[in-house]
Image (cartoon, grey):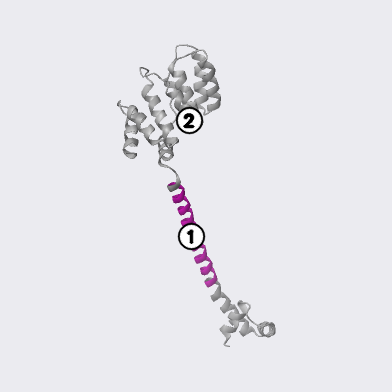
Amino acid sequence: MDQNELFKNYLEGKLSQEDKIILEKLLAENPSHKAEWEKFKKKQLPTKRGRFKSWAISFLIALGIVALGISLIYSLATPPGPKLFSAYYEPFDLSTLKISEEHKEFEKGMDAFRKENYEEALQIFEKLEEKSTEAEVMFSIGLCQLALDRPEKAIPILDRIPEESQLFKSSAWYMALGYLKLNKLQEAKTHLSIASEDNSEISDQAKVILAKIK
């Protein structure tokens, strides 16, 4: 066994106990052998670091591939309707609405909705509905239910908005989004068609979604 092989076996713990004792005694008593041992160790350290670095890079690459795979599986498992809902849903700006009665109460509800306190806003609007039959109140209740991830409750309320109301096409848009959330694409198409009839931002978005789900 040459010197380098002896040092390597010692470093890797492959020497017998007897050989180990002999080598350690030799290194302790002989300066030239100790110097050779120190040189050998310095040559080996970069190799170990390189191996660790290579292992770490391989591990990170593997981790990235696993994460990408999980993301892809999740994406493929998610139905198209909920994906489109997530991409296009934005809360309506209730500050654009005005009602003729109980104006202060309606403002309280708008403020709660703006702060994303949807449950509080819903309670205010439902209480207000007992006194007012205006479309703006019904519309606001439907929006709260949709924001609270309850499209099955939002849709029938929004469906009560009369065709002559200025909110009719907006209600059709949010009904379509509700149906997308439920992955009911055919029903979503019906209301997207209504929402796409005028020249507005909602109309443009409705046309884009219709093209995607044809």
The quadrant of the image that shows the C terminus is: top left
Residue at 33% over, 35% down: 210
Q: Position of residue 70 (x, y in %)?
A: 48, 52
Tell me the CA gap for discs 1 and 2: 42 Å
Q: Is residue 72 visible?
A: yes
Above or below for 63 versus 94: below
Residue at 56% over, 75% down: 42
Q: Is residue 50 magenta?
A: yes
For numbered disc 2, what is the local secondary structure?
helix
Q: Amino acid at mark 1?
A: Ala
Q: Residues within 10 Å of mark 1 (few under 14, many from 20)?
A: few
Q: Position of residue 192 (x, y in %)?
A: 35, 31
The quadrant of the image that shows the N terminus is: bottom right
Residue at 47% over, 27% down: 154
For numbered disc 1, what is the local secondary structure?
helix
* Residue under pointer 2: 152
Q: Position of residue 161 (x, y in %)?
A: 41, 20
Q: Nearer the viewer, mark 1 or mark 2?
A: 2
Q: Amino acid at mark 2?
A: Glu
